[in-house]
Every structure is written in structure tokens, then in C-alpha cells.
Image (cartoon, rainbow, N blue to C red):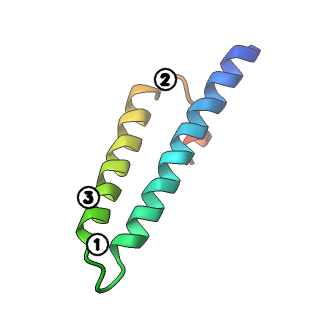
Amino acid sequence: MNINEGIYQAELRRLVRMIGIKYASAQHKSQIKGDQFAIYHLGQALAYEEAIRIVKMVFHEEMRGEDWE
């Protein structure tokens, strides 16, 4: 692996990690009892989860197994 491939893989890991953080935050907010925006946050969480699946599907060739954990 050359330097550019390493940078590319690091950026993909960073992308998935950032979306994962957004997912976790939205998932947490969706479980707050009495929050009038809980369903909105649930929708956000589902969208972030789907975004992660799409990124993993598109870039599965470039990434190693441990990169997705």
C-alpha cells in the first residue's frame, strides 16, 4: 500500500466513524421519553444507518475487514 492508498483508507474510516457518531446521537435522542422530536430523531438515525451501509457497500473492495469495526 502506498501513501495515497493509506490516506484514502483513513479518510473512508473517518467518514464511517463520523456518520456513526451522528447515528449514535440521533438514536439516543430518539429514545428520550416525552421528546416531541423523538420520531424525527429516529428517522435521522435510520438515515445515518443506511448511509453507513451504502458507504460500506460501495467501498468494500478498498477496505479491509478491520477498517469497518
Residue 15, picture quadrant: top right
The reply to whether callout 1 and callout 2 are in contact (CB within 8 Å) is: no
Front-most of residues 38 and 57: 38
The location of residue 64, given as percent across then percent down, is: 59, 32
Question: Which residue sits at x=35%, y=58%?
Answer: 45
Q: Which mark is residue 43?
A: 3
Q: Which mark is residue 61?
A: 2
Q: CA distance from mark 1 to mark 2?
A: 36 Å
Badge 1, how many Cα within 10 Å: few under 14, some, many 20+?
some
Q: Which residue is mark 1?
A: 38
Residue 1 visible in the current orientation: no
Q: Earlier in the sequence, mark 1 or mark 2?
A: 1
Question: Which residue sits at x=30%, y=49%?
Answer: 47
Badge 2, how many Cα within 10 Å: few under 14, some, many 20+?
few
Q: Secondary structure at mark 2?
A: loop
Which amino acid is tagged 2? Glu
Instruction: Quarter of the image for the N terminus: give it.
Output: top right
Front-most of residues 41 and 9: 41
The location of residue 32, given as percent across then percent down, is: 36, 80
Q: Earlier in the sequence, mark 3 or mark 2?
A: 3
Q: CA distance from mark 1 to mark 3?
A: 9 Å
